[in-house]
């Protein structure tokens, strides 16, 4: 049984300019008191074919976490263009994946993935984009936030007395968000970008490793980056 269950995730600024921060409001329920904080991470998939270009946009420690329904705001910077495989239109424009993860005691227990579409705001450039993008200020991003793909993992919590035999067993959650469900019970993205048609889908199939690159160097300590939760 999961001790922490996500109730709702809102991306407060969507659509937005490509260079804008991602501003989330996350609501979750905790059914037992936790001894340690929860780590939240936001990752941008720079290249669906290689994890080398994944960028961790930001992370935060949330706690102490009381029993009940809690919420907090989480902001993360936009990805850095110079950390992407290239700045060609073919690489930047179109669809990629944004991933929000939550971990307890360094073990990921839930992952929420969103498709992100990037295009020019100007219609003329949308129809005939330049071969190489030099000015990112003209780009807009649109996160398909009402069609998330959610994967939960079984992890040992404080009350567990034995190691789980299958610590990465998939279950389902986030029932407050509209999604489809496959025959195996895994929530799927729907809508204009069908699940299974984009190579970025493969990013969901295994536990996330630590990203090779960070979108920005850390300028604060772990204590300064801690986030207090609000009881609903």
Image (cartoon, grey):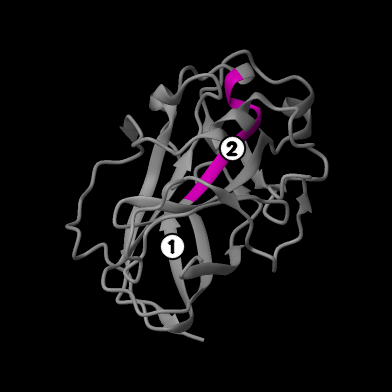
Residue occupying image coordinates x 40% and y 44%? 57
What residue did someone put label 2 on? 97
Residue 170 is left or right of residue 52, and the answer is right
| Residue 21 spot, x, y in % from top left | 47, 52
Q: Is residue 228 depicted above or below 208 in this figure?
A: below
Q: Which residue is mark 1?
A: 74
Residue 56 in percent (x, y) is at: 38, 41
**Res 33 label:** none
The residue lying toward the viewer, choosing from 195 and 212, is: 195
x then y, percent, for residue 108: 41, 50
- Please tell me which residue is depicted at 53% across the width and 47% down the height of the picture: 169
Residue name at image x 39 percent, y 77 percent: 229
- Tell me the chief SS of the magenta region: strand
- Where residue 214 appears, as percent x and y from the top left, is 32, 37
Q: Which region of the structure is painted magenta?
A: 91-100
- Asked whether 36 falls inside the magenta stretch, the response is no
């Amino acid at each position: 049984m999961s001790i922490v269950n996500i109730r709702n995730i809102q991306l407060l600024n969507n659509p937005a300019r490509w260079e804008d921060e991602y501003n989330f409001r996350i609501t979750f329920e905790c059914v037992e008191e936790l001894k340690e904080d929860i780590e939240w991470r936001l990752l941008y998939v720079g290249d669906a074919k290689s994890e080398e270009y994944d960028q961790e946009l930001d992370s935060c420690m949330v706690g102490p976490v009381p029993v009940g329904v809690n919420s907090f705001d989480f902001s993360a910077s936009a990805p850095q263009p110079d950390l992407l495989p290239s700045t060609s239109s073919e690489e930047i424009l179109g669809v990629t994946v944004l991933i929000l993860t939550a971990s307890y005691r360094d073990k990921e227990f839930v992952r929420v993935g969103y498709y992100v579409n990037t295009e020019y705001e100007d219609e003329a450039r949308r129809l005939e984009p330049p071969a190489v993008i030099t000015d990112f200020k003209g780009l807009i991003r649109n996160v398909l936030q009402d069609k998330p793909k959610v994967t939960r993992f079984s992890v040992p919590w404080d009350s567990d007395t034995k190691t789980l035999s299958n610590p990465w067993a998939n279950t389902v959650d986030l029932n407050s968000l509209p999604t489809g469900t496959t025959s195996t019970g895994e929530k799927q993205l729907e809508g204009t970008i069908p699940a299974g048609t984009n190579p970025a889908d493969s990013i969901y199939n295994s536990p996330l490793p630590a990203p090779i690159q960070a979108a920005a160097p850390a300028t604060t300590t772990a204590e300064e980056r801690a986030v207090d939760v609000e009881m609903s």
